[in-house]
Image (cartoon, grey):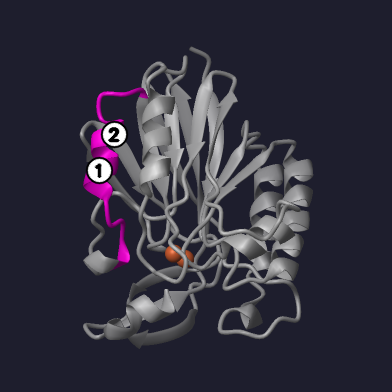
Amino acid sequence: METMKFVHLTDTHMNAPGKDGLLAKFNLADKVKMTFRHLQETGVAPEFVVITGDLAHEGDAEDYAYIRTLLDEGSALIGAPVYVVLGNHDHRPAFRSGFLGELPTEEPYYYAHDIQGLRLIGLNSQIPGKHNGRIDEEQLAWLKAQLETPAPKGTIIALHHPLMGVIGMPGDHLMENRDEILKAISGTDVVGVLAGHVHSNNVGVQQGILNVAATGTAFSGEMADKEHYRMVDFSGYNVVTVNEEGLAVQTVVLPTSNAEYFRFPIAALAAQH
Ligand SMILES: [Fe+2]
Ligand SMILES: [Fe+2]
């Protein structure tokens, strides 16, 4: 099998320039521009880029139109398509109209793409108005039907909420029905599950499948002390390699300051993240 390489970004939390809001003042779209420049300058040459949600930070259609333009420019710069999934800070109607140019409906956004024999499945784990995630019945049935036929190079699942438990994250912050999802993908051709949401680098194996929850492209989160959590200016991306030996993930750290953006009590984590 020929080696295939792609890039996993997550949690870009972008807004259009000049917007008000908790995170808008940090101009986090600049991090995404920096990421694409870094990819181009270092010659990574991925086959594609996938972004696992929280594309916008409580964005409206204008934000998503801006994000679309920015990602199209990034895609042109590195000569690779960009695929996205939705996170808890995304809004389906604004995404559908601003990003996809479709009617602003609450229709979940999920898909399967064949990329030179590798199947990329993007799932919609975002539930309108909630922080935690769930793959609904219809989507789960669709996923099972997709996986009945293996892909030549296997399947990568991209979704926002990780399937594995992550230290420091309250259980109600993660995937509600992860057991059901794990059951659906176990024994299939799924080789990796890529997620975000937690804004820190986490790697695990569940039922023989590699699970990765990557740090945020916009910022990272970490414990500041026993009672506080903080968001810091730390960004990175993962380069994922797939070949007959399996899957390899390289974390690339971008040149950021590590300075604290803000901190808050752990108890408020669900409201802030
Ligand atoms: Fe996030
Ligand atoms: Fe999130």
Range drawn in magenta: 173-189
Q: Please rate how many residues cluster around mark 1, counting C-alpha atoms within 10 Å: few if below 14, some from 14 to 19, many from 20.
A: few
Q: What residue type is labelled 1?
A: Glu
The image shows residue 87, relative to residue 192, as above or below, that is: below
| Residue labelled 2 has its Cβ within 8 Å of some atom of ligand 2 | no
Can you give x and y, in whole percent of width and height, for residue 36 in the image?
68, 50
Q: Based on the displayed image, in which of its 4 quarters is residue 34 positioned?
A: bottom right
User: Where does label 1 land, which residue?
Assistant: 180
Q: Which amino acid does label 2 sit on?
A: Ala
Q: Please rate how many residues cluster around mark 2, counting C-alpha atoms within 10 Å: few if below 14, some from 14 to 19, many from 20.
A: some
The numbered dot on residue 206 is: none
* Residue at 73%, 44% in the rendered image: 75
Q: Left or right? Give the position of 38 relative to 271.
A: right
Can you give x and y, in whole percent of width and height, for residue 53 in the image?
51, 56
Q: Based on the displayed image, in which of its 4 quarters is residue 13 positioned?
A: bottom right
Q: Check if residue 28 falls in the magenta segment.
A: no
The numbered dot on residue 184 is: 2
Can you give x and y, in whole percent of width and height, for residue 237 in the image?
52, 51
* Residue at 62%, 36% in the rendered image: 48
Q: Is mark 1 on a helix, strand or loop?
A: helix
Q: Closest to the observer: 155 or 145?
A: 145
The image shows residue 127, relative to residue 261, as above or below, that is: above
* Residue at 51%, 23% in the rendered image: 118
Q: Mark 1–mark 2 contact, CB under 8 Å?
A: yes
The image shows residue 149, relative to residue 178, as above or below, that is: above
